[in-house]
Image (cartoon, grey):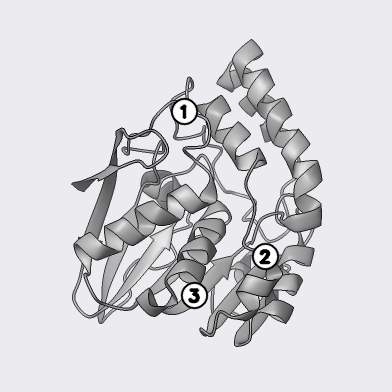
């Protein structure tokens, strides 16, 4: 595991990103979702780029997640800030190279903000279970604020116990293990409040993003509604949408 130290524009403090890069060839980077990490994704069977031959494979923990550090400051975890981290990491590990970015949930927000800002850094995108956005972000905003308040009042294990009882989307493997967030409990409410206050780039900005994009949505998940996936597919000029209804269909490239 390697680490990269970056300056956070929100606070002026330092953020240390934990990452690993293996293999040789064209670069592919994977980004995890909110409260997850490289290790948690592997445990959940969500490492979508593992073992790809002929590529340099880059995984990293977003600030405040896993083995990466982050400030206890409101606004430091908005998706545009995470996009700055991604671009800084690419400049460090694969300077000047175009990369294919694979983002899941929160990672979709990070990737899209980075690609809108610097499309020349990307050869293509894979957007896995895009999160709530635009109109649907309003209800998610309230849910995230409730999560933050409950974690502060009752603790992460009590909150996780309630989350565990929620039904899983049919595209999720039924034997997937239950895992706690890979985030320090004291930081978790800040992450949820920042997630509540952030959103995807506007549809007008996305319409100018001329990159090949694969979008993978799945059914029956209020936190990752097909409305977002379909709007992205309509807005992006070179996109393909794949909808998963079973675990077998939830991997990129499976029909």
Q: Is residue 157 above or below residue 199?
A: above
Vertical comparison of 120 with 165: above or below: below
Residue at mark 2 to residue at mark 3: CA–CA distance? 17 Å
Determine the residue positioned at 58% across, 55% down. Answer: 105
Label 3 crowd bin: few (<14), some (14–19), many (20+), radius 10 Å: many
Q: Could you say which disc has been placed on residue 202 in the image? A: 2
* Left or right: where 122 falls relative to 89: right
- Quadrant of the drawing holding the C terminus: bottom right
Contact check, label 1 and label 2, Cβ < 8 Å: no
Mark 3–mark 1 contact, CB under 8 Å?
Answer: no
The image quarter in which residue 5 lies: top left
Sequence-first tag of 1 and 2: 1
Image: 118 above or below 151: below
Label 1 vs label 2: CA separation? 25 Å
What secondary structure is found at the residue carrying circle 2?
Answer: loop
Q: Is residue 48 left or right of residue 231?
A: left
Q: Residue at x 41, y 36 (%)?
A: 64
Element at badge 1? loop
**Residue at image point 50% right, 52% down:** 80
Marks 2 and 3, the one that precedes in the sequence = 3
The foreground one among 228 and 23 is 228
Numbered badge on residue 226:
none
Callout in the foreground (3, 1): 1
Image mark for residue 125: 3
Residue 73: image tag: 1
Residue 46 screen position, x and y as percent: 48, 57
Q: Nearer the viewer, mark 2 or mark 3?
A: 2
């Amino acid at each position: 595991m390697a680490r990269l130290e970056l300056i956070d524009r929100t606070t002026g403090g330092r953020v240390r990103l934990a990452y690993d890069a293996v293999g040789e060839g064209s670069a592919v980077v994977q980004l995890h979702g909110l409260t997850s990490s490289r290790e948690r994704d592997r445990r959940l069977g969500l490492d979508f780029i593992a073992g790809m031959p002929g590529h340099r494979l880059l995984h990293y923990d977003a600030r405040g997640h896993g083995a990466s550090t982050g400030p206890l400051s409101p606004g430091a975890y908005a998706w545009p800030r995470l996009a700055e981290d991604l671009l800084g990491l690419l400049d460090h590990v694969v300077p000047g190279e175009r990369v294919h970015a694979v983002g899941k949930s929160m990672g979709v927000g990070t990737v899209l903000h980075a690609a809108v800002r610097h499309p020349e850094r990307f050869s293509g995108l894979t957007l896995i279970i895009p999160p709530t956005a635009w109109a649907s972000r309003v209800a998610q905003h309230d849910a995230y604020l409730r999560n933050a308040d409950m974690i502060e009042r009752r603790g992460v294990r009590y909150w996780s116990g309630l989350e565990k009882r929620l039904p899983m989307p049919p595209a999720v493997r039924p034997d997937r293990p239950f895992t706690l967030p890979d985030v320090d409990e004291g930081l978790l409410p800040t992450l949820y409040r920042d997630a509540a206050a952030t959103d995807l780039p506007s549809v007008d900005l996305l319409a100018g993003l001329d990159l090949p994009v694969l979008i993978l949505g799945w059914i029956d998940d209020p936190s990752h509604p097909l409305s977002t996936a379909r709007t992205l597919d309509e807005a992006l000029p070179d996109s393909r949408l794949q909808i998963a209804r079973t675990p077998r269909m939830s991997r990129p490239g499976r029909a």
